[in-house]
Image (cartoon, helix red, strand yellow):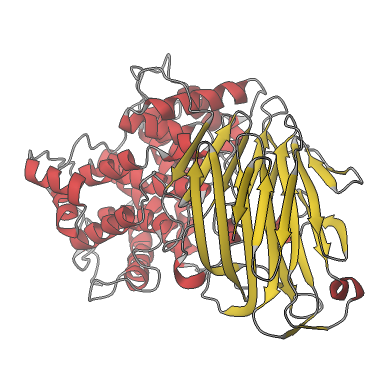
Amino acid sequence: MASVVSPEISQNWLIFSNLICLFEIFIKYSLLSLMCVFSLQVNATLVPDIPHKDSNPFYPILEEIILEGNTENIDVNTLSWYYLSADSPKQGDPALLADIIFTIDSILTAPQGDDVNIVIFDTARVLDAIDQILLTELNALSDELLARWWPYLEQNMHTIYEKRRNPEHKPNEHGLNYPNPDAFALLAVSIAKRYFELEEPDLFEAELLQGLSEHLYADGAWSYLFESNEEPAYHGVVLTGLARYYERTGSVAALSLLVRSAPYYPLSVEVGGVTEGSTSPYWKHRWDVIFPWFPGLIAGTTHDAANQALYQSILEHNHSFDVDYGEVAEKSDPHSQMLRMAASHYKNDIEVTTLPDNYLVWDSNIEGPRARYGDWSYTFTGRDLEKNRGKYTFFGTMVTDTSKGLYPLSGAVQIVMPSVYYNSQDSYILGMNDVNRIKIEEGVSYMTTVYDLQEPVSGGGDSRAVPWRGIQLWIADSERAAGLVCIEPKVPQIAFGLEATIRIGAGRGLPFKGLTYSELEDHQDMSYSRGKQDVRIVSHNFEDVITRDAPDDYRGESDDIVLRDSARVQGREHHYTDERYCMTLEIKPADSEYIRVRSEVSKTELSLNMGEYQLRL
């Protein structure tokens, strides 16, 4: 990393009609084609206007959050837009400029922790904020301020290069395999190269774009990390960094990624905004609310009618409950920046359409079925997770109720997994090395999986299989699902007991203050309800069934229905040889009836029947 060089203060946004390059970007997505971004740019804007203010649904929210006067949690590059834009009620406000300077100082002088992602996010936002002001109102920032800030930013860029790229241009640590910070690294490099002497910054940009392309699945989701499934909140973080990069550069390569991401929200988000959390990486299980500016940005940048229908549906739901958007947008990234970009890219000429409903499709984002029937939806996830990062569940379902309030999740089955206790307090529950067979036929989904249990890991680190086997069979249709879930030792083992857990709840980390939600109801006949989500244990060979608070981040919002074997009940060691413990269950929305579900378990065969449907393993 070399010393700081003088920035060129200009807005040299060029458009080159390179159709060969355009073909490469959209069809091949090769590293060479992504290099073409530097000769093919459209509609680049540093401080975007707000179009159609009279009908733009995002503009009043944008005004509200800045007029409330609380700038503490608004992204600093969004604050710069408020200071510079003619569409802002705070344009040229010296108090706002003072807030921006104070925020930048606070970010840059705060002690750096071990999380390089925080460095990446902060550096991108600060560089964007400074660059907007220097290119628009050069004298607003003194030479003294810049002289104080540049060394911090130079060191941060050195850290980004060190952690995200090595001299051989190959992945280093998580480099090019971590889409949400990589999108912000892309933004940071694109700005920093004008102020610092960086090593091959154009190539680094192309590499980051290539990484984002390779981790964008066919149905529009970015993986959270390596080859994991998506995580809805972090998908939004990727969009925030990438869309701002697109705004600033006009990169057609970036636009093509936004276009490819368009199927994700309409496929994965319920009409009130709730996302399915069971398919996410196990340490990121959340049942988030997607706010209207997320699909709103995609609708505006890509002219996508389905995303427009979704954001209009969420707006309609939220308006009926008088949501405080100021509270939401001020909470944290990426809300304030995404809101501003949704307002800037709003279109009033997108065709009207309706949201998809009553469907069962193969979702390549999770490599399994995704179904939605009115308020009830379910998923199976069959993705082979690289690095053995483990699954918390293979099946998930939820019921929404848009009449219940701002957070319309009525109840979700979040986890259905067996576990083995390797001491009196700790258990193996995650699954890895799964062999999955999934079929969709005439409106019915079938799944079998045989897998190893694994050691617990944190933060998505690599893990090791343990000599215990999980087996699951599932059938689901438009009204219910049935499952057979078993655990057995692969070789004789000593353990402190076995359990099978059904986690049912209202979410994890509720998105609004003061929310209330339904408690778990135990009907005393092996059936349970949480809101409009019902669960029935049909049969099992465990010792007992109890309910308890879910642990850790789920506590207070979710409950566990737990089946325990005799060793676990008595709190003692047991020598397991070839025992197979199983439970059979039925899961449904409250407006469906329970039907006949049965299973057969032998040493050589497992079978599950749900009404007329049958599955064998």
In the image, 510 versus 162, the foreground residue is: 510
In the image, 383 versus 387, the foreground residue is: 383
The residue at the point 65 percent across, 34 percent down is: 479
Quadrant housing residue 513: top right
Horizontally, residue 477 falls left or right of residue 148, namely: right
- Residue 77 image offset from top left, x and y in percent: 41, 44
Asked whether residue 46 appears in the rendered view, the answer is yes
Quadrant housing residue 214: bottom left
The residue at the point 55 percent across, 27 percent down is: 314
Q: Determine whether 523 is above or below 86 in the image.
A: below
Q: How many marks?
A: 0
In the image, 388 versus 62, the foreground residue is: 388
Image quadrant where one finds the N terminus:
bottom left
- Residue 207 image offset from top left, x and y in percent: 25, 61
The residue at the point 13 percent across, 44 percent down is: 23
Asked whether residue 507 appears in the rendered view, the answer is no
Quadrant housing residue 71: top right
Horizontally, residue 498 falls left or right of residue 240, namely: right
- Residue 474 image offset from top left, x and y in percent: 62, 51
- Residue 213 image offset from top left, x and y in percent: 30, 53
The residue at the point 37 percent across, 66 percent down is: 156
Image quadrant where one finds the C terminus:
bottom right
